[in-house]
Image: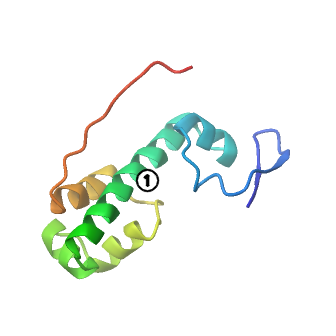
Amino acid sequence: MRLKDRSGKEKNEGDPIKKKTNGHRLAELLNISPSQGMEAVIKAQLIKGVLEALKKEELTHQELAKRSGLPRSAVTGILNGSLQKVTIDRVLRLVEAVGLVAEIKLRRAA
């Protein structure tokens, strides 16, 4: 995957989305604001937990939709990585639907 930094210089670092990254780094890679980067990372971490629980419990997207009260198409989109227009409250509904609790840890920026 080829990305450009804020200056427009092209970067080729493999697939940074598949690597563990923080919100500030993601923001730099995608040329978005740091807060948008942090939000994307938080959503991705929550969705990863939902996917792991979904696999462990052998639930279908339809069953998760019923538990969460979300449309099945929305559940499928979220779990397939579509983070655009996905709100934290929808992701948290999925977290709750698989019986998980989200905890947040804050630290000083480097």
- Look at 59% across and 54% down and name the residue there: 17
Q: Position of residue 12 (x, y in %)?
A: 79, 53
On screen, residue 83 versus residue 104, left or right, reads right
- Look at 48% across and 60% down and name the residue there: 84
Residue 58 visible within the image: yes
- Residue at image mark 1: 44
Q: Secondary structure at mark 1?
A: helix
On screen, residue 100 versus residue 106, left or right, reads left
**Which image quarter is the N terminus in?**
bottom right
Q: How is the image coloured?
A: rainbow
Residue 87 visible within the image: no
Q: Amino acid at mark 1?
A: Ala
- Look at 38% across and 57% down and name the residue there: 48
Vertical position of residue 52 compared to residue 109: above or below: below
Instruction: Return the residue found at the far front.
Output: 56
Q: Position of residue 36 (x, y in %)?
A: 51, 42
In the depicted view, which residue is nearer to us: 59 or 31? 59
- Look at 41% across and 45% down and name the residue there: 42
**Which image quarter is the C terminus in?**
top right
Q: Position of residue 55 (x, y in %)?
A: 29, 70
Q: Quadrant of residue 47?
A: bottom left
Q: Position of residue 86 (x, y in %)?
A: 39, 59
In this rendering, the count of numbered labels is: 1
Vertical position of residue 84 compared to residue 22: above or below: below
